[in-house]
Image (tube, rainbow, N blue to C red):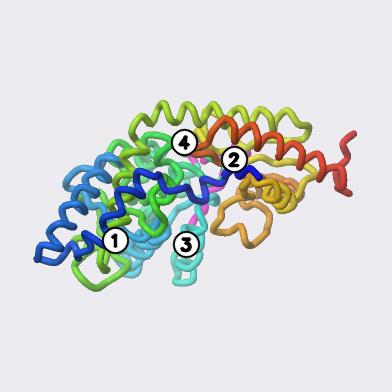
């Protein structure tokens, strides 16, 4: 049976070049990069080269900090909890602004901070999945310590105007953080051009291995800490750095940005082909205009077909997709993004997210189209709620 992977917003395959680059660091160059002997010296230079690739990949300056950590969930927690301890708990400010469509690692941490007395505002999105900048302006106050808004949404692929939103936050003296997990490798991500104070990312979303990510801290911004201990990462994140994963992520970042425009254009062409096939079916809709989304993502609502049932059909035929974020998909609840944009309860349970990568082939898309269309036809035929004549 043919296997087609269309869940790249959940995780990606490791680029074979990245896998090869990591190989020597398991059993040959395995020294602690903080050690002073030759084993440490030889790994330290490779770690430094990986960091240079990461700095270049997100447009960071030499004076900025870039912390290699475990993942963006850790980075998001570091920023939110760090700002709480450094600013809010000391009584300086007591307000955080985020959105209703952030990744679960953001939403859950904000809910936790609310139990500690922090006031959190969740900005809504409109029926196109977009944030209104005027909403941000209206909720900002002198009490706002931090604004945190993702660069691109993990489910809809909608791109938010980060530079504009960061500027609005800074006008009121608030710090600005963006979760750029779903943007890297799809659009240009430049932390300095966008003038963000903090930026987080996960390597496994752009063909690096799982278990490694990064936190950018702009020079001059407060330096939040979550894990205390040794003086690793300039004292900003204790724990011996995982050199093989850092090396892999550095190369993956470079490969993701190399020829980005052409790669993104080809992903968009294949994504549009798949999207056109879906939209040729009655009672199928897709969230968001194509030009305002990253090049690889489709969030479709298929009336009369429950999302989990469709996934089961696709999986039996070798096609991997999802109903939304893998970090919350086990809940089997209504898609929170469709709920946020105002979809009714039935439609919110009919979500199908399809996400491509630069390794997705046209042959795979053609196969996936045939499988998906056949599955929709079968499931609608046995649905008790769908009226094809309606």
Left or right? Give the position of 361 relative to 284: left
Q: Residues within 10 Å of mark 4 (few under 14, many from 20)?
A: many
Badge nearest the viewer, 3 or 1: 1
Where residue 26 is drawn, which disc sits there?
Answer: 1
Nearer to me, 288 or 319: 319
Nearer to me, 61 or 384: 384
Q: CA distance from mark 3 to mark 2?
A: 21 Å
Where residue 358 is drawn, which disc sits there?
Answer: 4
Nearer to me, 194 or 28: 28
| Circle 3 residue | 110
Instruction: Determine the secondary structure under disc 4.
Output: loop
Left or right? Give the position of 220 relative to 115: left
Report the magenta residues as a range.
120-134
Nearest to N terminus: mark 2 or mark 1: 1
Q: Main secondary structure of the magenta part?
A: loop
Q: Residues within 10 Å of mark 3 (few under 14, many from 20)?
A: many
The location of residue 58, given as percent across then percent down, is 30, 41
Nearest to N terminus: mark 4 or mark 1: 1
In the image, what residue occupies the spot 59% across and 32% down?
363
Residue 130 is a magenta residue: yes
Residue contact at pointers 3 and 2, CB within 8 angstroms: no
Nearest to N terminus: mark 3 or mark 2: 3
Instruction: Determine the secondary structure under disc 1.
Output: helix
In the image, what residue occupies the spot 59% across and 28% down?
272
| Circle 2 residue | 126
Q: Is residue 117 above or below residue 389?
A: below
Q: In which image quadrant can residue 259 be found?
A: top left
């Amino acid at each position: 049976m043919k296997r087609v992977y269309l869940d790249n917003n959940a995780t990606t395959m490791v680029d074979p070049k990245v896998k090869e680059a990591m190989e020597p660091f398991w059993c040959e160059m395995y020294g602690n990069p903080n050690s002073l002997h030759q084993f440490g010296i030889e790994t330290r230079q490779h770690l430094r080269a990986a960091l240079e690739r990461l700095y270049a990949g997100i447009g960071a300056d030499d004076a900025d900090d870039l912390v290699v950590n475990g993942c963006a969930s850790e980075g998001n927690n570091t920023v939110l909890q760090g700002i709480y301890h450094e600013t809010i708990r000391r009584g300086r400010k007591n307000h955080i602004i985020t959105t209703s469509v952030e990744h679960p690692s953001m939403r859950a941490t904000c809910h936790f901070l609310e139990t500690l007395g922090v006031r959190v505002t969740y900005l809504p999105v409109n029926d196109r999945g977009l944030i209104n900048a005027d909403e941000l302006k209206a909720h900002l106050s002198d009490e706002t310590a931090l604004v945190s808004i993702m660069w691109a949404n993990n489910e809809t692929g909608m791109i938010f105007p980060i530079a504009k939103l960061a500027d609005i936050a800074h006008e009121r003296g608030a710090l600005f953080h963006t979760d750029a997990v779903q943007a890297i490798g799809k659009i240009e991500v430049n932390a300095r051009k966008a003038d963000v104070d903090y930026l987080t990312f996960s390597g496994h979303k752009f063909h690096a291995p799982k278990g490694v990510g990064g936190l950018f801290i702009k020079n001059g911004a407060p330096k939040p800490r979550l894990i205390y201990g040794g003086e690793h990462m300039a004292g900003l994140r204790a724990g011996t750095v995982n050199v093989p994963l850092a090396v892999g992520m550095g190369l993956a970042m470079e490969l993701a940005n190399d020829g980005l425009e052409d790669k993104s254009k080809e992903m968009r062409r294949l994504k549009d082909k798949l999207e056109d096939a879906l939209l040729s079916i009655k009672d199928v809709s897709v969230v968001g205009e194509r030009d305002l989304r990253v090049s690889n993502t489709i969030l479709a609502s298929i009336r009369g077909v429950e999302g989990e049932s469709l996934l089961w059909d696709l999986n039996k035929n070798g096609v991997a997709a999802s109903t939304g974020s893998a970090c919350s998909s086990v809940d089997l609840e209504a898609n929170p993004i469709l709920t946020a944009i105002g979809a009714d309860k039935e439609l919110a349970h009919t979500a199908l997210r399809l996400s491509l990568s630069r390794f997705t082939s046209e042959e795979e898309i053609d196969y996936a189209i045939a499988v998906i269309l056949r599955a929709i036809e079968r499931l609608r035929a046995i649905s008790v709620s769908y009226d094809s004549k309606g």
